[in-house]
Image (cartoon, rainbow, N blue to C red):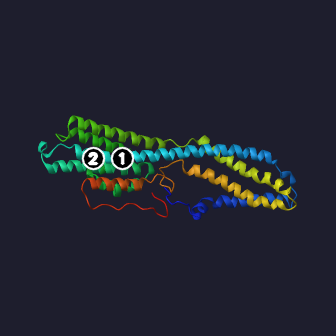
Amino acid sequence: MYVRKHIHWRVIWAYSWKDVLIFLVYDTAVAVLYGPLHWHWLDVPWQLVSIVGVAVSFYVGFKNSSSYNRFTEARQLWGGIVNRSRSWTMLVLGHTQPPARVASTPERVAFQRQLVYRQLAWTNALRLHPRRQPDLWAAEVAPLLAPDEAARLQATANPPAQLLLLQTLALRDADGLFSELQLRTLFEELRELTNLQGGCERIKNTPFPRQYAFSSVVFVWLFIALLPLGLVGEFEKLGHGHYWLTIPFSVLVSWVFATIELVGHISEDPFEHQMNDVPMSALCRSIEIDLRQMLGETNLPTKLEPVRGVLY
């Protein structure tokens, strides 16, 4: 997620320089054909071009609004994951029965730590799963689990779901640590975590409707193709030779439309580890710091900072 107040011009140029080059070549070709070569039949009525431009702007606006809604929902889901992770830890630590009612205090503390660390493993597994980064499992998930659990889960199709199942089985087998009401509350937390995971998977596995995404690109480039044909005659009305003004103004307007369409395109999937996506790595690190502090640990990882204005 880009976090700087203003986007650096290098970022904008990196995304748009190829398109600007295409616009420049095409618009120059139209101006040369219309002026020096006298291909005046290229002139298209400006009213037609303006109607197309208005229609395209409405369509692209609809696409961008839908893309932004996908990002917003994804960020809300991960906000829920942050809150539920804290809630889970507080319930595990606060609802455990007093030491006199369990076998031993070390056993109770070890069980609490296991439940909390498995929650940390779940958040990191949920981050790696939609990003398709299984190669990071050994470094970022396995250390949070028992070795046999880590090896077994890595081979499954959906490690986050399997981790929630392990949490459920651990609570079922907890002997004397929780009352019936407390167990019911913890099971409810696991159900909510399952719903949050399902929401993330729904966004990831349901691509933005191709009929909208593809049509938006086609309509924008159709307008860009018509734009200099409509402007060249209008500028010529200002006086002979003014048709050369078609080049800078067509490039400018074409860049605006192409950039608006690109903004919607790069917001379609918020889980791709790109500069405009949900900063899942930073959120997982924040969760880890909070939960391990709740456990009383002091050797904590540092908070992730933006890299060139981007928080991953």
Identified by mark 2, the residue type is Met
Question: For residue 7, what is the image quadrant?
Answer: bottom right
- The percent coordinates of residue 114 (x first, y second) are 24, 49
Residue type (three-letter) at the residue carrying disc 1: Asn
- Relative placement, left or right, of 241 versus 212 is right
Q: Is residue 294 left or right of residue 34?
A: left
Q: Which residue is mark 2?
A: 90
Q: Residue at x 25, y 58 (%)?
A: 297
> Badge 2: few (under 14), some or many (20 or more) residues near its Cα, within 10 Å?
some
Q: In the image, is residue 1 above or below residue 80?
A: below
Residue named by callout 1 = 83
Q: Quadrant of residue 27?
A: bottom right
Query: How far across and down, in percent of the image, does residue 36 sit?
Result: 86, 62
Q: Secondary structure at mark 2?
A: helix
Is disc 1 placed on a helix, strand or loop? helix
Quadrant (top left/top right/bottom left/bottom right) for the C terminus: bottom left
Labels 2 & 1 near each other (Cβ < 8 A): no
Residue at 83% from the left image edge and 61% from the top image edge: 242
Residue 250 falls in image quadrant: bottom right
Q: Residue at x 41, y 56 (%)?
A: 282
